[in-house]
Amino acid sequence: MIRQFSDIDLSDRNSFHVAARAARLVEFDEAADLPEIFHEIQKESTTRGCDAEGSLGGWRWYVLSGGNNMLFAKDYEGTLIVPVAKEIKIVSEAEDKTTIDVSAGLEWDDLVEWAVKRGLWGIENLSAIPGKVGAAPVQNIGAYGVEVGDVIDSVTAYFPDSGFRTLTREECKFGYRDSIFKRERCVIVALRMTLSSVDAPRLGYGDVEAEVARRGGASLRHIRSAICDIRAAKLPDPQEI
C-alpha cells in the first residue's frame, strides 16, 4: 500500500525535530510499489523544475528512514520516500545458524531484541543504535567491535534506472562506516542476514567485559543489557534533548 502526503510537517520524522516541511512524502510497505512511486516522480518532473542534484528526471527524491542522521536546514522541495514494512521472515534454520530476511522499515533495535530472545548471536553488540534496518548497511553501522556487514548476506534494493537488484556482501563493498550505498542512489527494501546459534561473545571493547561480568557472565541478555546501559550513560537521548 502507498500512502502519500503533500506539504507535510517533518518535525516528528527527524531526531532533531526540526520543523521543516516536504513538498511530498510517500510511504510504502511493498517493494513492488516502488516502480509506481518513481513513475509518479518522473511525471512530476514534467511540471516542476528542480536542481538536478539528487534527482530523477529533474525531480528530487531522497529516502527518509528514522531521520537520525538527518538535519533539515530548509524545506525539502522534492519527494521523500519512506519504507514502513517491518517483517522478519525466517528463511532457513540449521543447528548452528539461522538465516532471516528483514524489511527495511523495522526499527534496528527491535531486530536486536528479536535475535536476543531467540538465542541468536551476531548483532547483540549493536544494541541501542537508533534507526531503521534499511539504513544500517548504508554506513555499515558498527559498535563495540562489531559491524552489521559481518552478518549481512545480501541487500535487496530498487535502483530507479535499472530496477531491483540483490547485492551480495562483497558487492555491497562494506568498509569502515562505508558501503556502495553511499555512492549509488537506491531504495533499500530488505536485508538477508545469517545469525549464529553458537555462543560467540565479543567483549574486548571498552567497558563491555567488566559490565557483562558484573551481570553474571557472557549471555546474550547480559551483553545487550550492558551495552544499552553503557550507551545510555555516555550518549545523549535524542528524545530528551
Image: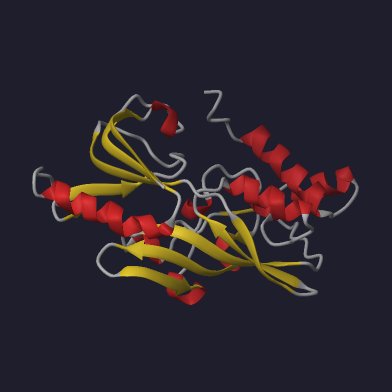
Q: Residue at image x 72%, y 37%? A: 229
Q: Residue at image x 37%, y 68%? A: 164
Question: Which residue extends farthest right?
Answer: 216
Location of residue 145 with respect to 44 vertically, above or below: below
Q: Is residue 171 left or right of residue 50?
A: right
Image location of residue 121, percent across then percent down: 73, 61
Toward the viewer: 40 or 231?
A: 40
Location of residue 83 with respect to 18 vertically, above or below: below
Image location of residue 29, percent across then percent down: 45, 50
Count the numbered circles shown: 0
Q: Is residue 100 left or right of residue 31?
A: right
Q: Residue 20: tell me if it is visible.
A: yes
Image location of residue 195, percent across then percent down: 69, 66
Q: Residue at image x 26%, y 43%? A: 79
Q: Residue at image x 76%, y 75%? A: 94
> Residue 233 appears in which quarter of the rendering?
top right
Image location of residue 65, percent across then percent down: 44, 45
The colour style of the image is secondary structure
Q: Residue 54: tell me if it is visible.
A: no
Location of residue 164 with respect to 208 vertically, above or below: below
Toward the viewer: 29 or 146?
A: 29
